[in-house]
Amino acid sequence: MLKVFCSPARYVQGRDATMSLASELSRLGMARKPLIIASSTARKELEPVWREMFQAAGLDYAIMDFGGECSFAEIARGKEEARRVSASSIVGAGGGKTLDAARAVAAELELPVACCPTTASSDAPCSALSVVYTEDGVFEKCLFYRRNPDLVLVDSTVIARAPVRLLISGMGDALATFFEADATIRAHRKNVVGGLSTIAAAAIAELCYKTLLEDGTSAVAAARAGSITPALERIIEANTLLSGLGFESGGLAVAHSVHNGLTAAPETHDRLHGEKVAFGTLVQLALEGRPRSTVDEAMGFCLSVGLPVTLAELGLQNLSRETARAIAERAVAPGESAHNEPFEVTAMDIMDAIYAADAMGAAFKARASR
């Protein structure tokens, strides 16, 4: 089997990077008439910048307000709007779901796409896939594309102004990157783009984890102060670029499957993607029988930045066996990444690991509070 590595064509990050959007689109031949699919937050914060920038460049553009859920209905609405305005490219501006919808619209219309995240809450911006949910927010399926975004532009000023919980959630998503890539590589399974992992992907995934451990708490402190520091810049890059390249070219395993299972529990719908992935990572570590030092390191990181280590923190303090079974069965559905572990994984295995991770998390918190 061939090794495959993928990445966005161009990645740009830094203070006030939005001011460079028009020139970056022009550089890539995408600037004639972009349609910006924007979250409400992105539009409120960035529309004056877009207006000034595109006018100065003598370029036309259009904006579509994102409906809030990356569903098939929302993707169809975006396609209709892009056709109506004769868009030459799609620009997604907002959180992960906004960017997922923008990539889906661009892929179906075979248009180039730029992703401009307004948070560092997930590794979605760099990927060649979209996660589609029902209108009620339940995971439905993943859509995979032939190529990654043409441009990922990350404005650190915007990220620093976003709610800190979103940055922390991004670290939860990034926490899984190394462990999932490691499992996939050990199992000789395909990565997300259909090949074996390169040593570059493995190195990036490991660097992602090390960056979280070294800079996570400092980045949270900077974000709480609304300050852009080197630590915050490194965490933005870890959450967005390192995690994005690491998960896609390294591979996914149990952590994200558990996240997908957790979306079936209504109690978790107000929890963020990365918060559920972080707990899914602990479930994976329990399932794999990782050394206590490894589990404690991961749990210590979660506690230090404010990520969940117990079911109670996900709203599942009284998780019934019936609900746990539904979560576990969803996590091991055909095609799920749980099957990328180097051993067979059953729903019963996932159930046991969920309860074990919860017990370990509760014990770790008790020890830490003494």
Image (spheres, helix red, strand yellow):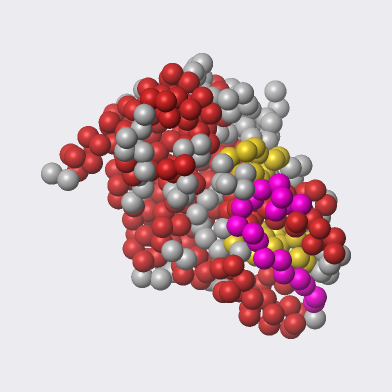
* Quarter holding residue 139: top right
* Boundaries of the magenta span: 59-76
In which quadrant is the N terminus drawn?
top right
Viewer can see residue 91: yes
In which quadrant is the C terminus drawn?
top left
Towards the viewer: 246 or 118 = 118
* Quarter holding residue 86: bottom right
**Residue occupying the point 77% across, 67% down:** 34
- Does 331 appear in magenta? no
Q: Name above or below for residue 43 compared with residue 183.
A: below
Viewer can see residue 241: no
On the picture, is 218 further left or further right than 237?
left
Residue 112, position in %: x, y? 78, 56
* Quarter holding residue 364: top left
**Residue occupying the point 52% across, 51% down:** 122
Residue 111, position in %: x, y? 81, 55
**Residue occupying the point 41% across, 61% down:** 164
Residue 13, position in %: x, y? 57, 63
Towards the viewer: 298 or 205 = 298
**Residue occupying the point 79% across, 62% down:** 81
- Does 74 appear in magenta? yes
Towards the viewer: 120 or 199 = 120
Q: Name above or below for residue 314 compared with residue 118.
A: above
